[in-house]
Image (cartoon, rainbow, N blue to C red):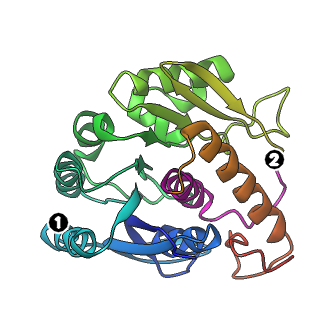
Amino acid sequence: MQPITALSIAGSDSGGGAGIQADIRTFSAFGVHATTALTAITAQNTLGVSQVQSIDPDMVEAQVRSVTSDFDVAATKTGMLAEASTVERVAQLAREGLLPHLVVDPVLVSTSGHVLMADGGIETYRHELFPLAQVVTPNLREASVLCGVDVRDVANLDDVAALARTLLALGPRYVLVKGGHFAHAPDVDRAPDLLVSVDGLVVFDGPRLATNNDHGTGCSLSSAIAAGLGLGRDVPDATRDAKSFVLAALAGATTWRLGAGRGPIDHLGWSE
């Protein structure tokens, strides 16, 4: 079978759990050939990020143009872009039509609290890249920052939906607010993701698994959505498949002990 090709524009995770490493494994799990454009190098492990080195936007652009001049890229996802200038450069490439089925995962802060986006990046995301995206996939904390809302004020799913609609007004066709950080009573054992478009709202519910091995779930979900879009699925179906994939990968890695902190998920079904 001839595989399709997808492109990840993202940062490197030296611990292998998130970032471009997670994207490659996710694409592979869906039978998709992974190509990449590296935006930053991070020194990190399961305990956190200790150092970040951004890659010059000219080099990011060169990688994208090299890939798209040779491969028939069917879908694209962005992860950590690190600098406002890189967000702008990616938006320029999208305006040229080089980034089909664009899924934007606006990586702003790591799970350990390390800031992964320089000053000015939030506004550049909002005004330059989001209007060009097919899907934007912030987690609850990122959605709150992007909307200028204190995440502590997000008390129920109606509040989450309001964040999603605020982001939808910026121009993407769909906004998916991921529910991994939403843990309010009475549904503390659930992790609902909310997908909003002009056609309405869809809730993709799922159980919250008790595990320390959840590093890279956001990267993996956005990559799985991009893979599904490249394979011809519509956004709701691609999102449903992606959530099922991540849930299975979380379940598979529950008993793993890779590192002393938050470990990776089982992208490739090794535990099966």
Residue at 70% x, 69% y is 265
Q: Nearer the viewer, residue 196 or 229?
A: 229
Mark-to-mark CA distance, 1 and 2: 38 Å
Q: Is residue 15 toward the left or the right of residue 84 in the image? A: right
The residue tagged with tag 1: helix, strand or loop?
helix
Q: Is residue 24 toward the left or the right of residue 257 in the image? A: left
Q: Amino acid at mark 1?
A: Pro
State the mark number for residue 126.
Answer: none
Mark 1 or 2, nearer chain start: 1
Residue at 29% x, 34% y is 131
Is residue 148 visible in the rendered structure shown here?
no
Q: How many marks?
A: 2
Q: Nearer the viewer, residue 93 or 1?
A: 1
Percent position (x, y) of residue 267? 68, 71
What stretch of residues is rendered in magenta? 208-230
Residue at 67% x, 72% y is 264
Percent position (x, y) of residue 32? 53, 70
Mark 2 crowdedness (10 Å alpha carbons): few <14, some 14-19, many ≥20: some
Percent position (x, y) of residue 83? 24, 57
State the mark number for residue 57.
Answer: 1
State the mark number for residue 208.
Answer: 2
Q: Is residue 97 magenta?
A: no
